[in-house]
Image (tube, rainbow, N blue to C red):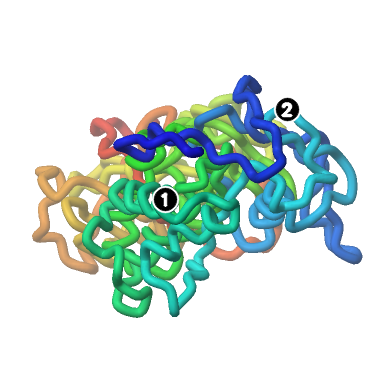
Amino acid sequence: MVERVARLIGIRRLEQPGRAPAQRVAEHDVTFREVSKVYDETVALDRVDLEVRRGEFLSLLGPSGCGKTTSLKLVAGFERPTSGDVLIAGEAAVDVPPHRRDVNTVFQSYALFPHLTVVDNVAYGLKQRGVSRRERRLLAQQALELVDLRGREHHRPAQLSGGQQQRVALARALVLRPRVLLLDEPLGALDHKLRQAMQIELRRIHDEVGITFVFVTHDQGEAIAMSDRVAVMNNGRIEQLDDPQRIYDVPATPFVAEFVGDMNVLEGLRTAADRVQLDDGTLLHVGRVLDEAPAGGRVRVGVRPEHTLVVQDEGSGRRGRLEAVMVVGHELQLVVVMEDGTKVVSRQSRTDTAVGEALEPGTRVWLEIAPGAAVVLGPAQPAQADAAPLAAAAPSPARNPQRKEKTA
């Protein structure tokens, strides 16, 4: 009999009938060892190694087709790896069917039963496991309280908002107390404000229940806001696995640098190990090199928008023309066209007295780049189009460089 408790976080993990209780002693709840998955001739995963720590919130982040959803399916048991091993709590799981794994999944589609009430939707899995009606209703009500849906027990899904339906799906997964909860882009169908609210709720719920969350998303902002660690994926491989701030501040590869957050991409001549001369003669002090290029060769250089400063003082930095000024909350986003035609985006506080909000498109300005902020992304590609910053959703630190001389 399931123990009566006052809160969901005190519920013992319910076992499937006939299954011996698993011991929560493994250091890692999910382990991939050289896992590959091939569909016909398409390599979805390419020799991936991954360890998900017990109780952490890990996000798999990447563009469409990078392998993140395939990874989730392998953990859930919906797919088998072509090669390699998948372990759950240190035990081989490849031959374990989905319903026997200590894993539950929340999908973007919610998959609620329209004819059942909210409380019966949440209690459905408990019913399948043979839990008594009285106990499953008690546990379902506790789960609904955890996701802040108390008082909605007898509503039908059609009577709820999208965010409320998502919470019902989450409660239904949590009430079974799985070792690992998989979330497959669960916030994708919500509007922007509701997504932000649900990010806070998901993190709160994770911290309360203490189980392992593996969250799949292509949204950089979601991954950085909620996760303990982020695995950035590309072409079936993990490019970097790190804490969110290091993913943004210290990218390990050119792909991570350009995919996570805004990045202005410039070109120039590498004159020394830590120096790049742009086409207008400006010398940049390079802080990091992600892909080696020989001295004397042309390279691509990345600079975050918040590491630039737009000023009106002649003779300071690179000269250009202001093309656009956009107010984004407490920040200004300034698009500057340099004399060589390159467009650079600068992001700075609206209270920055060096700029002010009186600037209009067409104004001549100068662009400063903070010393050490530039990152060498690799050799320049021939016939590359004018560089432009990537679209980004990731939050960035609110910081601006100090005004420096032209050599930065």
Above/below status of 400 relative to 263: above
Q: Residues within 10 Å of mark 2 (few under 14, many from 20)?
A: some
Above/below status of 387 relative to 104: below
Residue 255 in percent (x, y) is at 61, 47
Q: Amino acid at mark 1?
A: Glu
Secondary structure, mark 2, is loop
Residue located 43% across and 28% down the image: 372
Residue located 42% across and 50% down the image: 222
Give the residue number, with chain letter if any, for mark 2. Answer: 90
Above/below status of 75 relative to 109: above
Residue located 68% across and 51% down the image: 76
Q: Residues within 10 Å of mark 1 (few under 14, many from 20)?
A: many
Q: Which mark is residue 222?
A: 1
Locate residue 92 relative to residue 244 in the image: left or right. right
**Distance from Cα at disc 1 to Cα at disc 2:** 29 Å
Residue located 26% across and 39% down the image: 398
Residue 340 in percent (x, y) is at 46, 59
Residue 219 in percent (x, y) is at 47, 56
Q: Which mark is residue 393?
A: none
